[in-house]
Image: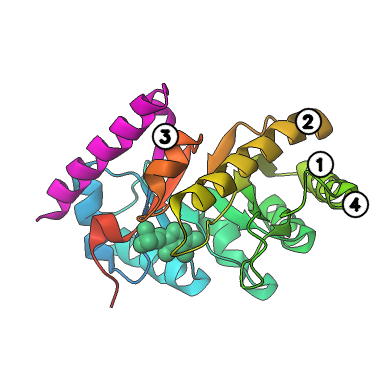
């Protein structure tokens, strides 16, 4: 199957999941996760109509953006999303090149980006990553107990309010990753509790709308859309397996 065909199949599945949930398919943005794939694959996807690309390594983002630019010149409607966890000393390429950063997992990285964005005269949309499943190998603000644990809510509210007040950073909502190889009801519950946390944050940190949810990958994006995802980050279903 060609990339164009995989994209069309994927669009059909995204639309069907949105309609099942009574949502508009237009409310779901596909972020095509192009990590490990070269610039010419990005341009093939761009030619097929894809405009949002996800990368998870700062140096790879930098190299690929330069390679795309060298091949095709500036493409103002091609948007780079940084979806991985970001080390503080590697933040500059994200500040320079990304439209959106999905994985803010500590106040410090947001503060550093805010300074760099200010120097660059740029804005960055961000999602706060939350660890809803509680797995120790997952990044994100601890949130597995947010409904029961008042201290966890206080910490989340403080971090969210601090980041929301940073210049040049526009908080859009929450990002989460579901556990792998888990029964569907468990995955669904992780996505649902993320949406409920965003609803709570609307009253706790009202200077942000909390209207967007970045959740869902190749194996679970339909469940995520049914539970309210506005951004799905999909690699393998579009580009095939990564070597
Ligand atoms: C790689 C990656 C994805 C895409 O995963 P697929 O299973 O290829 O769809 C999504 N989100 C993050 C944070 C990733 O690192």
| Horizontal and vertical percent position of residue 218 | 35, 55
Q: Residue at x 51, y 34 (%)?
A: 228
- Which quadrant is home to the C terminus? bottom left
- Asked if disc 2 and disc 1 are in contact, CB closer than 8 Å, the reply is yes
Find residue 151 and name its label: 4
Q: Is mark 2 within 8 Å of ligand 1?
A: no
Q: Is residue 4 above or below residue 111?
A: above
Magenta highlight range: 1-30
Q: Is 129 in front, or is 110?
A: 129
- Distance in Å between CA atoms under marks 4 and 3: 33 Å
Query: How many C-alpha atoms fall within 10 Å of the one at disc 2: few (<14), some, or many (≥20)?
Result: few
Is residue 23 rendered magenta in the image? yes
**Element marked by disc 1:** loop
Q: What residue is pinned by disc 3?
A: 28
- Asked if disc 4 and disc 1 are in contact, CB closer than 8 Å, the reply is no
- Which quadrant is home to the N terminus? bottom left
**Element marked by disc 3:** loop
């Amino acid at each position: 199957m060609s990339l164009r065909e995989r994209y069309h199949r994927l669009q059909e599945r995204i639309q069907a999941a949105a309609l099942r949930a009574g949502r508009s398919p237009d409310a779901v943005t596909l972020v095509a996760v192009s990590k490990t794939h070269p610039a010419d694959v990005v341009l093939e996807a761009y030619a097929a109509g894809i405009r949002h690309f996800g990368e998870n390594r700062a140096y790879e983002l930098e190299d690929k953006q330069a390679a795309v630019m060298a091949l095709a010149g500036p493409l103002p409607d091609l948007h780079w999303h940084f979806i991985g966890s970001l080390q503080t000393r590697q933040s500059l390429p994200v500040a320079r090149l990304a439209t959106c950063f999905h994985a803010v997992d500590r106040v410090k990285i947001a503060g550093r980006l805010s300074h760099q964005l200010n120097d660059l005269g740029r804005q960055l949309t961000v999602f706060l990553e939350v660890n809803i499943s509680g797995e120790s190998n997952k990044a994100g603000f601890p949130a597995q107990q947010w409904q029961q644990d008042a201290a966890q809510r206080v910490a989340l509210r403080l971090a969210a309010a601090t980041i929301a007040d940073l210049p040049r950073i526009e908080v859009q909502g929450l990002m989460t990753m579901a556990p792998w190889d888990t029964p569907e009801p468990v995955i669904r519950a992780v996505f649902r509790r993320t949406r409920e946390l965003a609803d709570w944050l609307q009253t706790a940190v009202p200077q942000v709308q909390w209207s967007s949810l970045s959740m869902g990958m190749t194996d679970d994006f339909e469940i995520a859309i049914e539970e309210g995802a506005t951004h799905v980050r999909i690699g393998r279903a579009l580009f095939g397996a990564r070597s």
